[in-house]
Image: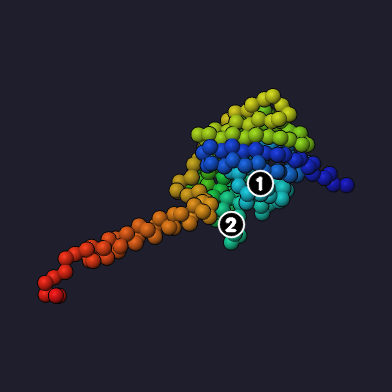
Amino acid sequence: MAIKSSIYKAQLSVTDMDRHVYDTFPLTIACHPSETEARMMLRIVCFAIHADPNLVFGRGISTDNEPDLWQRSLSNDIELWIDLGTPDESRIRKASGRAERVLLYVYGDRSVAVWWAKNEAALKRFSNVSVVQISDESMQAMAALASSNMSLQGMIEDGQLALSSAEHETLIEVELTTLKALKQCILPKMAPGARLARAVLGALKTAQPLALSILNHYDAPTPASAW
């Protein structure tokens, strides 16, 4: 008989001063029997870093054609693909072709060193792929916060994440090291109101020269020949 996944629930409060996200997300996380609590907590940390109402967990560690977390647009395009661990180059290549942005959160200090030495050159070809390493110490500290029902607080400022739990009197500063950043400039997704405001400003800038031309035309003195 197959062993079922363990279900964890978390109330995740996010205060992201970099992206101006201040919200609480009720999360339900299925932990596969082969997944450690440290890895499961890393999925929650990744959610905190990229918190968005449209960000969801994939179907699980045993599903090959889905990432650990992803975010789709209203047109069903994949805006964000997040994988954990050290995937092979072929999986990264496929993800890069499917998604607007691909983020890899790698862990395991020794295994990452070997994986990075093998794949660094190949990954440079993918401009929409970013690689971030989480230290073993941070992974162990996050695992210590795991419980079936959690109240977690994530605070992000200047790219640094501090994670705390209502059940533990502990504040964890998650150690993140960027091995590869995105090469291309990808603007963050704007709220509909922000998009409308930018469109209005653009329209005003376009209309300004025409308006000035019209005003100058009517303000100019009327030639005597027109009397």
Q: Determine the CA span between mark 1 and mark 2.
A: 17 Å
On the image, numbered disc 1 is attached to which residue? 68
Q: Position of residue 150 (x, y in %)?
A: 73, 35
Q: Outermost residue toward the front?
A: 227
Query: For the point 66% across and 30% down, which residue is it?
Result: 164
Residue 13 seen in render: yes
* Residue 107 picture quarter: top right
Q: Secondary structure at mark 1?
A: loop
The structure residue drawn at horizontal position 44% and vertical position 54%, both measured from the top left corner, is 198
Give the residue type that dot 2 points to: Ser
Most extreme residue toward the right is 1
Q: Is residue 202 above or below residue 46?
A: below
Q: Quadrant of the C terminus?
A: bottom left
Image position, residue 111 (x, y; %): 62, 34
Around disc 2, counting alpha carbons within 10 Å, would you say few (fewer than 14), some (14 to 19), or many (20 or more)?
few
Give residue 16's quadrant in the image.
top right
Q: Which of the two discs, 1 and 2, labels the residue nearer the N terminus?
A: 1
For the residue pair 221 and 55, the one nearer the viewer reads as 221
Residue 132 place in picture, x, y as percent: 56, 38
Q: Identify the residue at horizontal 53%, vertical 47% (top origin).
A: 129
Residue reaching furthest left?
224
- The residue that mark 2 highlights is 73
Amino acid type at image mark 1: Asp
Q: Residue furthest bottom?
A: 226
Question: How are the residues colored?
Answer: rainbow
In percent of width and height, residue 161 lies at 58, 33
Rendered residue at 59%/40% (across/down): 22
| Above or below 220: residue 130 | above
Mark 1, Cα crowd under 10 Å, few <14 / some 14-19 / many 20+, is: many
Residue 43 shown left or right of residue 221 in the figure: right
54 lies left or right of 29: left
Dot 2 lies on which element? loop
